[in-house]
Image (spheres, rainbow, N blue to C red):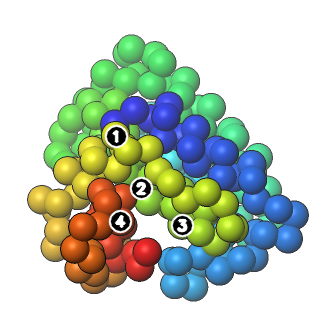
Amino acid sequence: MDYRAVAAGFDRRVGGVSQGGWDAQSPCEGWSARDVVAHVVDTHRRMLANLDGGTAVAVGRDDDVVAAWHAVHAQMQSALDDPDRAGKTVSGMFGEQTFESLVSRLLCTDTLVHTWDLARATGQDDRLDEAAVGAAHAVLAPLDDAVRRPGGFGPKIEPAQGADAQTAFLNFCGRSV
């Protein structure tokens, strides 16, 4: 999956949140729009810490999530643009692999799902990149049980007959479309 494309979609939704939209309830139970962005920032920070051997600092309640997103997005893109860092072997949910591969599989999938969550919470366009949807579904399908652990996705929803790829993917992720 292409981080640049997935992150651009998320960035558009972050930029489209109205002043009063940050407290809007997202499709993630108990999470506001702000909480969704904080989670994506925190996930990026954890991945960068994994790459660099540092410690990730979680977004604080009073932190500016827009500024935090812009900073961590730039850091991630910088890491991916550096061949040495992008090609470094790291450990993760899928075992040892290059940092670039882990970002492509795990981070892009997480960011893509939460792009939809943020769009839904704030009344924005919720159409996702079709190629990213297909790639993310292919990554998650073999991990069906593993992604449903506490703190992960909820139970699958059976998509309606003839559902498009995005709906089927989101239903797989426990999202009601």
Q: Residue at x 40, y 32 (%)?
A: 2
Residue 46 visible to the viewer:
no
Q: Secondary structure at mark 1?
A: helix
Q: Identify which amino acid the numbered label 3 is placed on.
A: Asp
Q: Which residue is mark 2?
A: 110
Instruction: Say if 54 sits above or below 29 in the image.
Output: above
Name the spot of residue 123 as percent of width and height, x first: 68, 67
Q: What residue lies at 27% left-to-right and 77% top-to-bottom?
A: 160
Q: Name the residue furthest top.
A: 83
Q: Secondary structure at mark 4?
A: helix
Of the pair 159 and 145, the residue shown nearer to us: 159
Give the labeled residue for mark 4: 167
Could you say where residue 32 lies in the image, as x and y percent from the top left? 65, 76
Is 110 in front, or is 100? 110
Q: Relative to the observer, which residue lies in front, 67 or 21?
A: 21
The relative height of residue 121 versus residue 83 in the rendered view (above or below) is below
The x and y percentages for residue 157 are 28, 81
Residues under labels 4 and 3: Cα distance? 13 Å
Q: Earlier in the sequence, mark 3 or mark 2?
A: 2
Residue 89 percent coordinates (x, y): 25, 30
Residue type highlighted by circle 2: Asp
